[in-house]
Amino acid sequence: TSLHSSVVPGSRDRLGNDPIFALNAEAARRRAAGESILNATLGALMDDDGRLCTLPTVLETMARVQDHTAGYAPISGLPAFRAAVLHDLFAGTELAARAVAVSTPGGTGAVYEAVQNFLERGQQMLAPSFFWGPYRAIAAHTGRSIDTFPMFTSDGAFDVDALAAGLDAHLERQGRALLVLNFPCHNPTGYSLDDAEWARVAEVVTAAGHRAPVTVLVDAAYMDFGGELARSWVQAVPALMEAATVLVAWTASKSLAQYGARVGALVGLHRDPSELSQIDNALGYSCRATWSNCNHAGQVGVTELLTDDALRARVGAERSGLLTLLRDRIEVFNRHVDATGIPTPRYDAGFFVSVLTPDEERAAARMRELGVYGVPVPGGIRIALCSTPAAAIPRLVEAIEAGVAAG
Ligand code: PLP
């Protein structure tokens, strides 16, 4: 019968839903049936009562701009919004003058545009061995794919030598490279590069970029939860730009707790102005050819939130409450997990951490028997501390211990 399917072969038998949402649904079913379930799967910041955390100033501002929903926004985004994103990232540096931004539906749309325009069909995006699952689908959907390098050395540091080898292999094989680095607060491991690591990454990118086109996509989705690391990567951008193109996936989803607004941007930086205008045009074309244009009211609201000093200060103060909530959970988690001796990457900030274990499927299944849900990823189990109350962490770590012992 599949011979007669109207769905083309490449699109058949695809999962219509993300596997994480499926696990979440199972956890919700068991809880509704009366079991005590600890659900550490979903990547949104929740308070200790399981309610989505929001920022009052953001909600007020977004409600106030609703009369902008009727008309189209420009294809590449409102000029003021595009400038506001650059201001948010690069205020106080010279970088905004060498950057362009186009609006996208969230960071997801930004990643899509990067894959579409900086790799040819059949080529591979390069990512660390732990990566955000949808990268794979986004790449596959555009006829590209993903390839990885080992993320950590045996002593748990980011493996810059493996990254260099990966870049070399890609230049050799496909004559270009698109590297995605989701720091700070890497999903799923919780790792953030320190200044010295960013500097070493820039060295290997520059060495590669002198040989063939190299693009580095900084997926900064979680940066505003990085505390002092929030903009640490910006210092590395001038060095990265010496021989490479730099892209930044910007999103309001986590920074402004506006997951559903679908307000994001893809930023491009290049040392050569004519190349930069080429990038701007290519990204605008992709907007037109996919979603046409993005949430108009959302861009108006986010522009105000990023550029009005009084609003920005209020949002910063409100967000710092959420950072404290998360930091307390991280502190409790690190203390409990360190006592078990189970390896975890360095985890100072962010929504997620992973415990490292070779048989993640068995470990996660054992945890589920104990009513505790994490997300198995190759080589580990992702724990969403963003949705785990501090009081539940001792139970979580006990289940992790049982899972790792079974795995
Ligand atoms: N990148 C990473 C690593 C993420 O975890 C997410 C969201 O979960 C995104 C990008 C994009 O999210 P959105 O499309 O909601 O901005």
Image (cartoon, rainbow, N blue to C red):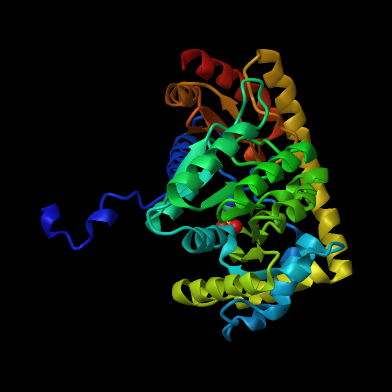
Residue 195: x %, y % from top left? 79, 40
- Whether residue 45 is visible to the viewer of this picture, yes or no, is no
On screen, residue 347 above or below 351? above
Residue 247 horizontal/vertical position (percent): 63, 59
Quadrant position of residue 57: bottom right
The residue lying at 77 percent from left, 67 percent from top is 96
Lateral position of residue 294 relative to residue 238, left or right: left
Q: Is 188 situated above or below 52? A: above
Q: Quadrant of residue 19?
A: top left
Is residue 54 toward the left or the right of residue 143 in the image?
right
Where's residue 76, x and y in %? 59, 76
Q: In the image, what residue occupies the spot 52% across and 45% down?
A: 126
The extreme bottom residue here reads 71
Q: Residue at x 68, y 49 (%)?
A: 222
Q: Does 372 appear above or below 134?
A: above
Which sits in the foreground, 96 or 55?
96
Looking at the image, which residue is at 66% across and 32% down?
A: 158
> Looking at this rendering, what residue extends furthest in the front direction?
211
Q: Is residue 350 visible?
A: yes
| Mark count | 0
